[in-house]
Amino acid sequence: MLRMSKLTDYGTLVLAQLAANDRGLSTCASVAAATHLGQPTVSKLLKLLARAGLVVSVRGAQGGYALARPPETITAAEILDALEGPVAITACSSAVGLCGLEGHCRVGAAWQRINRSIRVALESVTLADLLTSPDPLPAEMLERELRKSAATG
Amino acid sequence: MLRMSKLTDYGTLVLAQLAANDRGLSTCASVAAATHLGQPTVSKLLKLLARAGLVVSVRGAQGGYALARPPETITAAEILDALEGPVAITACSSAVGLCGLEGHCRVGAAWQRINRSIRVALESVTLADLLTSPDPLPAEMLERELRKSAATG
DNA sequence: GAATAGTGGACTATTTTAGTCCTGTATGAG
DNA sequence: CTCATACAGGACTAAAATAGTCCACTATTC
């Protein structure tokens, strides 16, 4: 359904946790406890995020992880890239001998346009946005949000 | 990687094929032959597309499928909806007892914004756009297209 | 009434994703 | 200098989603 993986979803929670604790380092274990995710899972996520340069790690006793940059400079696109690889709605349907539209896939160009639109949308939202809702939510809107969340799961 | 399923990809090829043959009905078998996809797969796709109202079906001998509407009025969003269910990048990461950010998922609102952006992007591209590349193809490319189309029928 | 062609659903196989575990390495404290 | 802490990397298993196939049934035409 064109949705991101659970891991990516978890990843934003993990990043949010690091952002909340920006005074110092957070250990894998403490993040796991705070997010109620499994420690091995959090570990895996932090390793991926570290490799992507979104978080920095300090090894050894008293070590841990922290955001590499302020939340305002980390985009949703970067998070997706780090945890799911490059965002691309389709890698072009034309595998050799498969594409019915012979050799050059006529369908490709428009999908690329859609890709770019999605990319722009993802780049325009930062981790900071993900943390603090951008529109100041009036109480009733918040309420509606809650109800909706409850409805969808 | 935030990509649509293969089936959806195939679905656009199938729709493209129907659009190409808009003078009459196409059988499941002929579409399969033209797209080089398996006949059962094409059958499945056409059934789904028919149920979603994007194509119409005629049963019995001399039956087949055709687009229900002109390609200009069928959006990428509708195709995705038909083949993958409602497009939603995330169903909100806050499962009960899972979301570390206190009951109401602070992360949700911005994802919803991204969702809407993606939706708009998908609604702004039609099947017609998917067929005819928006950038005018250089003459030789067009020529190649024609030759290959003629060759395969 | 025989052949064609869509309908619906069940089923299997494959692939992807999620989650776990183990071994290794860097750092700091005692 | 040794031990405990905590990240690094990768292999592995389990679970779920996806892709693909098959069958019995219904409608239509010749």
Image (cartoon, coloured by chain):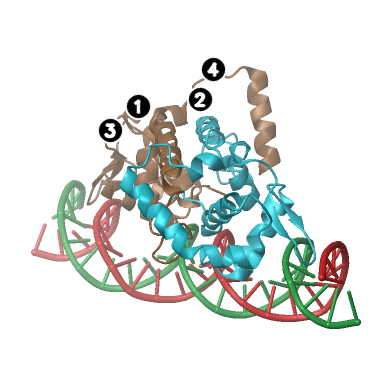
Chain colours: A brown, B cyan, C green, D red
Point out residue B99 in the picture as x, y percentages from the top left corner.
54, 42
Q: Which mark is residue A72?
A: 1
Task: Name which of mark 2 and mark 1 comes first in the sequence.
Answer: 1
Name the residue nearer the viewer: A148 or B96. Answer: A148
Q: CA distance from mark 1 to mark 4?
A: 17 Å
Point out residue B104 in the picture as x, y percentages from the top left corner.
59, 34
Q: Amino acid at mark 1?
A: Glu
Q: Give the residue number, with chain letter if any, for mark 2.
A: A133
A134 above or below B81? above
Task: Name which of mark 1 and mark 4 comes first in the sequence.
Answer: 1
Q: Which of the chains bears the disc numbered 2?
A: A
Pointers 1 and 4 in contact (C-beta within 8 Å): no
Q: Which mark is residue A69?
A: 3
**Residue neighbourhood size for the residue with mark 3, other residues' Cα within 10 Å, grouped as few (<14), some (14–19), many (≥20):** few
Left or right: B70 with respect to B7? Answer: right
Name the residue nearer the viewer: B47 or B111. Answer: B47
Q: Amino acid at mark 3?
A: Arg
Q: Quadrant of residue B32?
A: bottom right
Q: CA distance from mark 4 to mark 2?
A: 7 Å
